Amino acid sequence: MRVPRATYRLQLGPGLTFDDAAALVDYLDALGVSDAYTSPFLETATRGSHGYDVADHDRLRAELGGEPAFQRLAAALGARGMGLLVDVVPNHMGIAQNRNGWWLDVLENGPASPYASTFDIDWRPVKTELTDKVLLPVLGDQYGDVLAHFPVALLGSDPR
């Protein structure tokens, strides 16, 4: 098992692609960095993302340069004997713009979806009428704006 000696965090995005990161490898090596530590780089639900709203676990983000650019980064790191650590948070998934096939399959097929166990869904909640269903609150605006306009009288009411 490889143990990193010193890492350097790279927040990938439109301003720092795989090729941009590859161009930094010599500099990082000169600093004594043993491993590049990147933000997630799988395909996201939104463009210009921080990377934590993964929508497709089978594809590298095109806006970062996709597979070819990732291979160039890996080759640059390998040429210097450096490693790569990737920040992966399995439960961080984006559902925006209907780009997450796993989520759409769960909404369509419920617990029969092959991806049902991927999500933290209580298929047997206290309210039996919600058994095998997803209760999905949808806001009509940004959370802060909705909350700011939420009627104060409802805040103290019983949600049941």
Image (spheres, rainbow, N blue to C red):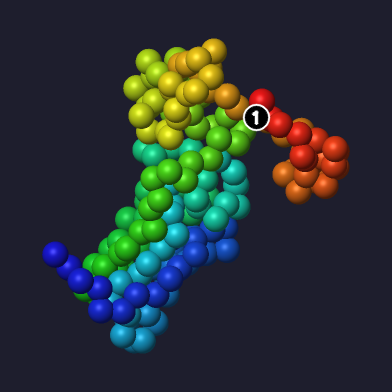
The structure residue drawn at horizontal position 25% and vertical position 79%, both measured from the top left corner, is 5
The structure residue drawn at horizontal position 60% and vertical position 52%, both measured from the top left corner, is 48
Tag 1: Cα neighbours inside 10 Å, few (<14), some, or many (≥20)? few
The structure residue drawn at horizontal position 26% and vertical position 68%, both measured from the top left corner, is 83
Q: Of all residues shown, which one is farthest toward the left?
A: 1
Question: Would you place residue 96 above or below residue 104 in this image?
Answer: below
Secondary structure category for the residue under label 1: loop
Residue 10 placement (x, y as % from top left): 45, 68
Question: Would you place residue 24 above or below residue 115 in this image?
Answer: below
Residue 55 placement (x, y as % from top left): 48, 38
Q: Of all residues shown, which one is farthest toward the bottom?
A: 31
Give the camera-side residue of 62 and 41.
Answer: 41
Q: Is residue 131 visible?
A: yes
Q: How many numbered discs, if any?
A: 1
Question: Would you place residue 39 above or below residue 60 in this image?
Answer: below
Q: In the rendered structure, which amino acid carries the disc numbered 1?
A: Pro
Left or right of residue 141, residue 57 in this image: left
Give the camera-side residue of 6 and 151.
Answer: 151
Residue 153 placement (x, y as % from top left): 85, 38
Left or right of residue 28, residue 51 in this image: right
- The C terminus lies in quadrant: top right
Residue indicated by mark 1? 137
Residue 56 placement (x, y as % from top left): 44, 37
Give the camera-side residue of 17 and 128.
Answer: 128
Q: Is residue 79 visible?
A: no
